[in-house]
């Protein structure tokens, strides 16, 4: 995130620490999660977060809960606020998408790199890693599934109850997604190309640098 967004985020952290009521903090968390899923820039997300924190803090000082200050329908309130915020341009949207994908891909590449490195230590000493069809399809699936799950849960944060049944459903969903990932990775061991260990390591570094550059540029 940009310097001004990072500074605002730190100020919001301090402001949020002034909210002591557990119910108020829970309401704020749900609203922030919902706002994070909106198509608005990180800077405006933090500005909305600041406004929410200030409203709840002032309400607590007057002995009023968040429900009294904001109203019963938190989703409706958030939608009204989001509707007033300018949407990012197509260029900003694409850059933010590249930023998020580059970080996700870098994490997957690190896991793949370490697993291959371990295999080389106990087996074939050649400094070449094999990239298979399963590796590529598994990476694509994991990134798409992760983005989809986060978006769905963020959009439905006000309607998801934290009860045992929903907890079991979440665990089951994660299990199914993991099972599909393993099946994709192991059922298609067809080699696409070989890559030297040093090039794989360099790719990890380059992806991380790309992520940091985009993260600093995107407001």
Image (spheres, helix red, strand yellow):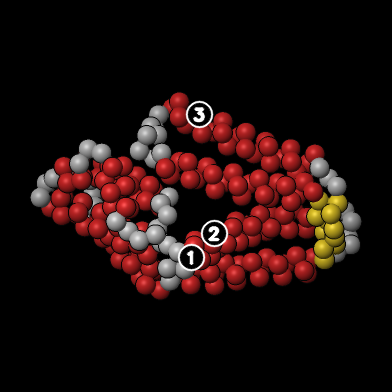
Sequence order check, earlier mark of 2 and 1? 1
Crowd tier of the residue under label 3, counting other residues whose Cα lies within 10 Å: few below 14, some 14–19, many 20 or above: few
Mark 3 and mark 1: Cα distance apart in space:
37 Å
Circle nearer the viewer, 2 or 3: 2
Q: Which residue is mark 3?
A: 168
Mark 2 and mark 3: Cα distance apart in space:
31 Å
Decide if residue 164 is on the left or right side of residue 74: right
Q: Are marks 3 and 1 in contact (CB under 8 Å)?
A: no
Occupied quadrant, residue 67? top left
Name which residue lies at 75% across and 49% down.
135
The one nearer the camera, 214 or 59, is 214
Residue 92 circle label? 1
Q: Is residue 15 above or below residue 136?
A: below
SS under mark 1? helix
Q: Which residue is mark 2?
A: 97
Residue extending farthest front: 90
Mark 2 and mark 1: Cα distance apart in space:
9 Å
């Amino acid at each position: 995130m940009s310097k001004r967004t990072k500074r605002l985020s730190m100020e919001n952290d301090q402001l949020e620490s002034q909210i002591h009521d557990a119910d108020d903090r829970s309401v704020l968390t749900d609203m922030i999660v919902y706002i994070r899923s909106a198509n608005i820039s990180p800077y405006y997300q933090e500005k909305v977060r600041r406004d929410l924190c200030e409203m709840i803090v002032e309400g607590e000082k007057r002995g009023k809960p968040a429900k009294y200050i904001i109203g019963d329908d938190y989703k409706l309130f958030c939608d009204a606020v989001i509707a007033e915020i300018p949407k990012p341009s197509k260029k900003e949207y694409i850059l933010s998408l590249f930023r998020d994908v580059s970080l996700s891909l870098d994490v997957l590449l690190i896991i793949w790199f370490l697993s291959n490195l371990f295999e080389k230590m106990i087996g074939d000493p050649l400094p070449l890693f094999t990239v298979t069809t399963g590796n590529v399809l598994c990476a694509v699936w994991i990134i798409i599934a992760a983005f989809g799950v986060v978006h769905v849960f963020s959009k439905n944060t006000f309607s998801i109850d934290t009860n045992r049944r929903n907890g079991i459903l979440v665990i089951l969903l994660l299990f199914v997604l993991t099972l599909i990932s393993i099946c994709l990775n192991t059922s298609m061991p067809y080699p696409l190309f070989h890559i030297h260990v040093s090039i794989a390591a360099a790719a990890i570094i380059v992806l991380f640098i790309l992520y940091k550059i985009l993260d600093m540029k995107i407001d």
